[in-house]
Image (cartoon, grey):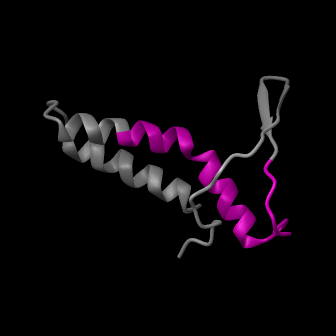
Amino acid sequence: MNRHTAGKWIVTGWKIGKTRNQFKMTVTTGENIAGSLEMQENVNLFESVHDLLEALELADAALTGANMDMKAVKHKVKAAIARARGEA
């Protein structure tokens, strides 16, 4: 069971700092969840966003009639979900 902060998440402000080939994003919550399982679950979700988008785009293409290897699409979708859950 995932313990990430329940959505819908709303961005009220943001700050991104660039360091050597990396971007740093600061997330503020209304509660102190630093170091908690909930915070780690949030991190897993943030880190998997590119994989999730790619998997959704593949699934969308497959569902709208593109000639695709459905086993490969299923594998990509399951891998993205596992990463979002911190299982990969």
Residue furthest to the front: 12
Q: In the displayed structure, would residue 36 be above or below residue 19? A: below
- Magenta-tinted stretch: 27-56
Q: In the displayed structure, would residue 50 be above or below residue 74? A: above
Residue 88 visible at all: no
Count of number-bearing discs: 0
Along the horizontal axis of the image, is 51 left or right of 7?
left
Residue 74 visible at all: yes
Residue located 78% across and 23% down the image: 21
Residue 30 appears in which quarter of the rendering? bottom right
Q: Position of residue 5 (x, y in %)?
A: 65, 66
Secondary structure, magenta segment, majority class: helix
Along the horizontal axis of the image, is 16 left or right of 51?
right
Residue located 69% across and 46% down the image: 11
Residue located 42% across and 36% down the image: 54
Residue 22 appears in which quarter of the rendering? top right
Q: Position of residue 84 (x, y in %)?
A: 54, 55
Residue 42 is covered by the magenta coloring: yes
Residue 6 is covered by the magenta coloring: no
Residue located 55% across and 43% down the image: 49
Towards the viewer: 26 or 85: 26
Residue furthest to the top: 21
Towards the viewer: 23 or 75: 23
